Amino acid sequence: MNTRPLIVASIAVMAAMLVFAFLTHNRLPEGAQLPIHWNAAGEADDWAPALIALLLPVGMLAFTTALFAILPSLEPLQKKLEASAPVLRAVWGGMILLSLVLAAIIGLPAWGVALSINALVLGMGFLLLLVGNALPKSRPGFFVGIRTPWAITDTDNWIATHRLGGKLMMAAGALNILAAVLQVQAEALAIILVASIAMATVIPVAYSWWFWRSRKAA
């Protein structure tokens, strides 16, 4: 699997975010603090020194880039890894997008532009859409996909589980995007985000077990 294009893209985005972080920091008064966490009501409930807060998205993307760059070399099922590459690329691309959104939420208020937590939910929605669209294309592996023991050891189980998981994840993404665009109340938005992600992850795991159980009983 060729990860070089995404590594280059990640480095370029991190460089841009570094420039943004230091330019933004220079606009702020000495000792200023910026939010780094928000509660279910969408209100900031944790703060950090401005430069640390502004560099947080850069650190998040750096960790993601290092992790995803290393994972392909650790995969024992190398022959099947290329088939799952779209999933890895979708998650990686989505994390780049989320890092940019988080950097904007933290830093843009210093430039007179305030973004609500809806922007982060919108980014999560697009991430879920990207991953959901890619999931059915994946094949059994230990690091990419919905890795239940029943799916890893049975290609038919893997395919069925990921087809269902892909549909549920895309539905969850569309629901979050719609809720963010309609500017649903923050508390309800948090519930929608958590419930939709739980639906898209727990149901496929249960289905994978049921698929294995039903074939074993047949």
Image (cartoon, grey):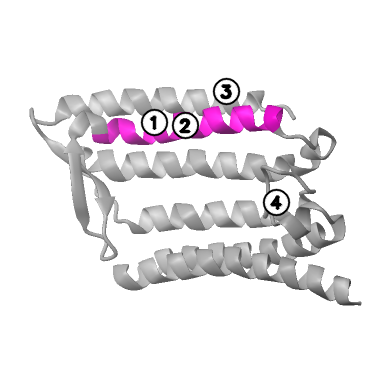
Residue farthest right in this picture: 218
Residue at 65% across / 41% down in the picture? Answer: 88
**Numbered circle sitting on residue 63:** 2
* Label 2 element class: helix
Asked if residue 20 is positioned above or below residue 114 in the image, the reply reads above
x%, y% of residue 166? Answer: 68, 61
In this view, the mark in front (3 or 2)? 2
The amino acid type of the residue labelled 2 equals Phe
- Residue at mark 3 to residue at mark 2: CA–CA distance: 14 Å
Asked if residue 106 is positioned above or below residue 62 in the image, the reply reads below
Magenta-tinted stretch: 53-74
Chain-order first, disc 4 or disc 2: 2
**Numbered circle sitting on residue 8:** 3
**Is mark 1 in CB contact (under 8 Å) with mark 2?**
yes
Work out whether residue 19 or residue 112 is closer to the camera in this orientation and state it: 19
Work out whether residue 177 or residue 43 is closer to the camera in this orientation and state it: 43
In this view, the mark in front (4 or 1)? 1
Place residue 108 in its image quadrant.
top left
In this view, the mark in front (3 or 1)? 1
* Label 4 element class: helix
- Residue on which disc 1 sits: 59
**Is mark 4 in CB contact (under 8 Å) with mark 1?**
no
- Residue on which disc 4 sits: 134
Residue at 87% across / 77% down in the picture? Answer: 217
Which quadrant does the C terminus fall into?
A: bottom right
Residue at 26% across / 38% down in the picture? Answer: 107
Chain-order first, disc 3 or disc 4: 3
76 sits to left or right of 26: right
**Is mark 4 in CB contact (under 8 Å) with mark 2?**
no
Asked if residue 151 is positioned above or below residue 204 in the image, the reply reads above
